Image (cartoon, helix red, strand yellow):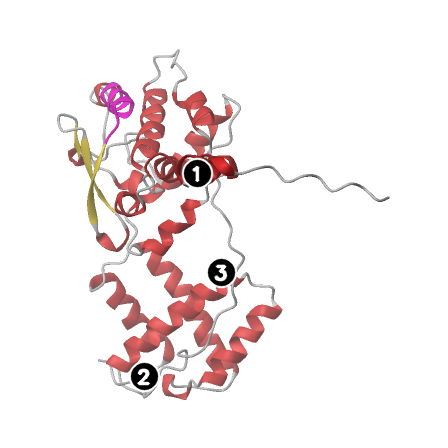
Amino acid sequence: MAHPNAPLNHVVQQYLDYLAYNKRYSPHTINAYARDMQRLIETLEDQGHGMWADAQADTIRDAMVTARKTHLAPKSIQRILSSWRSFFTYLLQQNLVKLNPVDGIRAPKSPRKLPNSLDPDQISQVLNATITSDDPMAMRDKAMLELTYSCGLRLAELASLNVFDIDLTDASLIVTGKGNKTRQLPIGRQAITALKSWLQQRGQLKCHDANALFINHRGQRMGVRGIQMRMANMAATHGQHIHPHMLRHSFASHLLQSSGDLRAVQELLGHSNISTTQVYTHLDYQHLAKVYDKAHPRAQEKTPLKEKPDHD
C-alpha cells in the first residue's frame, strides 16, 4: 500500500498495476488510463500540489476549463473524468484521500453521433465477391470480413481469436471481449464456408503462432492495424469504404431491423449496459413508417394533410 506522502507517479503506477493484474484490463485500456493519469499529475503539479489528498473539486473544475479552452472534444473530457473518478475511488479504498473530488462534476454533453453502417446490398457487394486468385492471404481476408459481419466482432476481438476458439461442427465461436468477459456466438453459413477455406490454406503455411486464427505472410498473428489495412484494401477494390467497426455497426443495425430484439443484440455485441446498444436503434424513417403502418391499429385511417395554398 502506498504512503500518503508517496510521489504522485508512484501511486499512479500502483493503480495501473492494479488495473492490469487485478482488473485484467487490456494493454490498450491501460495505456489510455496512463495518459489520463499523466494529465492529472500535470494538473496537480501546475497548481503546486504534491499529494493526492491536495486535490479538491476546484482542482478538477480548473482542469476541465483548461481542457475546453484547448478544444478537447466533449467525449474525450467525459473519458478523462471517468478515469479520474475511478482513480480517486481507488485512492479512497487505499485510505490515501478522504473524498473523491471528481464526484459531482459533470462532463459536457457530446452530440449524439449515429454509428456509420452499410445497407445489406453494400455489404453483399463486398462479401459476395468471388476470389479469383489462389492467394492464401486473399482467402484469409475474405474469412475475416465474413466472420466480423457474421458475429459483430470488435477489431481487438477478431485479432485475438485462436484456432481453438472456433467450432466448425457447432458453427460457433468463443470470443473474449472487454473486461476479459467471454461469450459464445453463432457463426453464419457463409462465414463457416470462408473459414474452412482459410483454415485449409493456413494449415499449409509456415506458422510461428500455432494458436492464432489469422496470421500474416510471416506466419505471425495479425495485429489490429494490419487487419484494418487489409479489410480497407479488399473493400476498396469493390468501390466500398469499410473498416471493421463499420461491419460491427452494420451487424447490429441489420439484426435490430429484422428482429427488434434489443436484449439479444446486446448479448451478441457483448455490451454490459443496454444503453450502449440503444445507439444502434437508429432505423431509417421508411422502415419506421412501415412498422407503424403494419402495427398501429389506426394507421390505415391516416389521410395525407392538404397542402395550404400559397399566398405569395
Asked whether 275 or 4 is in front, the reply is 275
- Label 1 sits on a secondary structure element that is helix
User: Is 251 left or right of 21, judged from the image as shown?
Assistant: right
Q: Nearer the viewer, mark 1 or mark 2?
A: 1
Q: Earlier in the sequence, mark 1 or mark 2?
A: 2
Q: CA distance from mark 1 to mark 3?
A: 19 Å
Mark 3, Cα crowd under 10 Å, few <14 / some 14-19 / many 20+, is: some
Residue under pointer 3: 75
Q: Position of residue 70 (x, y in %)?
A: 60, 67
Q: Principal SS element in the magenta part?
A: helix
x 37%, y 83%: residue:
52
Q: Which residues are magenta?
A: 187-198
Residue under pointer 1: 246
Q: Position of residue 213 (x, y in %)?
A: 24, 32
Numbered label attached to residue 38: none
x 55%, y 69%: residue:
67
Residue type at the position of mark 3: Lys
Q: CA distance from mark 1 to mark 2?
A: 45 Å
